[in-house]
Amino acid sequence: MHHPRGIRLAAALLVLAAWPTAGCGPAGAEDPADARRLLQSALDAWKAGRTIDQAAAESGVVLSEPRWESGFRLVGHEIRPDAHAAGFDLACTAELSLEAPKGKRTREVATYTISTHPARTVIRSPLDMPAAGASRRPR
């Protein structure tokens, strides 16, 4: 039996594997407003207390957010206006106010790669994850 986390990881790897070919078509294929709405919807579901698996099943969006998967609660968030193209996708940055499973509150800045077609995905960049036990303050 396949594990949902494994499916999300496989989808994320597929998106990353296709990344080198992202420049082969017309620029600006991703609608920034649609991508931001998709990110907003995902973060709202997290804040409302849904698990990542519930949110993915309800929305049909492939979601990958390690903090959400590991039980962090999203207390608040603000999507920054500095979105930029990442191939056919859009990269958006958000300031997150989190509560760890043991109750400690932290703030992090997260970068998400969002796609609305052909697959709808919201994937947190693994490059901006703080080291274990560390917290990053918004810039």
Image (cartoon, rainbow, N blue to C red):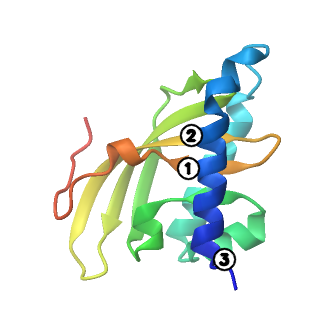
Q: Position of residue 87 (x, y in %)?
A: 64, 24
Secondary structure, mark 3, is helix
Q: Is residue 2 left or right of residue 107?
A: right
Q: Residue at x 20, y 62 (%)?
A: 132
Q: CA distance from mark 3 to mark 2?
A: 20 Å
Location of residue 8 by image quarter: bottom right
Three-letter code, disc 1: Ile
Front disc: 1 or 3: 1
Residue 123: which numbered mark, if any?
1
Q: CA distance from mark 1 to mark 2?
A: 5 Å
- What residue would you read off at disc 2? 113
Q: Is residue 32 left or right of residue 123?
A: right
Q: In front: 3, or 110?
A: 3
Q: Residue at x 62, y 79 (%)?
A: 3
Q: Residue at x 40, y 65 (%)?
A: 67
Secondary structure, mark 2, is strand
